[in-house]
Image (spheres, rainbow, N blue to C red):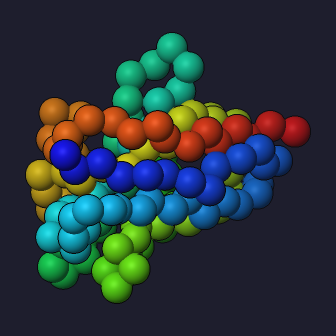
């Protein structure tokens, strides 16, 4: 089963930064596009960003464009999400998962492989 392990969340003040990490084990992550999603309390999962395999094409939700940067290190079998200028509305549990593709838009939750992992909590509050 394709499952990834997220880490790097925490409590940060508005305007602060965090870098989330996404680790794969048991399979080669660079064979897959990877998406970051988040789920705020009482809300559905929301696509945040994705990065393709191959050419490393990236996409971002409008709400995070210019603030978040997704990257991957295939040698380490890792994907990262650098989050800057964090705002209270970014508070959520963040998940990474392999996705069908990352071409022109953020993948939907129907385009993920496997199931959600444990996620990592990000809380933005003063």
Q: Decide which of 10, 57 is in the foreground and name it.
A: 10
Using the rendered image of the protein, determine whether residue 12 is visible from the camera's viewpoint: yes
Q: Decide which of 84, 62 is in the foreground and name it.
A: 84
Spot occupied by residue 101 in the image (x, y as percentages of width and height): 13, 57
Residue at 30% from the left image edge and 48% from the top image edge: 3
Which corner quadrant holds the C terminus?
A: top right
Horizontally, residue 126 falls left or right of residue 53, namely right
Residue at 22% from the left image edge and 64% from the top image edge: 27
Q: Decide which of 23, 41 is in the foreground and name it.
A: 23
Residue 54 is drawn in which quadrant? Answer: bottom left
Horizontally, residue 66 falls left or right of residue 123, namely left
Horizontally, residue 111 falls left or right of residue 4, namely left
Q: Decide which of 114, 95 is in the foreground and name it.
A: 114
Residue at 80% from the left image edge and 37% from the top image edge: 125
Spot occupied by residue 123 in the image (x, y as percentages of width and height): 70, 38
Using the rendered image of the protein, determine whether residue 83 is visible from the camera's viewpoint: no
From this viewpoint, which residue is outermost toward the top? 42
Spot occupied by residue 95 in the image (x, y as percentages of width and height): 43, 44
Spot occupied by residue 26 in the image (x, y as percentages of width and height): 26, 62
From this viewpoint, which residue is outermost toward the right? 126
In this rendering, the answer to whether 53 lies above or below 109 is below
Query: How many callouts does the rendering have?
Result: 0
Residue at 41% from the left image edge and 62% from the top image edge: 23
From this viewpoint, which residue is outermost toward the front? 26
């Amino acid at each position: 089963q394709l499952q990834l392990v997220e880490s790097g969340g925490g409590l940060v003040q508005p305007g602060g930064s965090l870098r989330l990490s996404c680790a794969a084990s048991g399979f080669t992550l660079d064979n897959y596009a990877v998406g970051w999603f988040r789920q705020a309390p009482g809300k559905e999962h929301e696509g945040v960003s994705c990065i393709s395999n191959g050419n490393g094409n990236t996409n971002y939700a409008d709400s995070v464009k210019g603030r978040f940067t997704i990257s991957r290190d295939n040698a380490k079998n890792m994907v990262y999400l650098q989050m800057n200028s964090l705002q209270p509305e970014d508070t959520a549990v963040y998940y990474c998962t392999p996705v069908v593709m990352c071409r022109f838009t953020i993948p939907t939750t129907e385009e993920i492989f496997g199931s959600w992992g444990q996620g990592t909590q990000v809380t933005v509050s003063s």
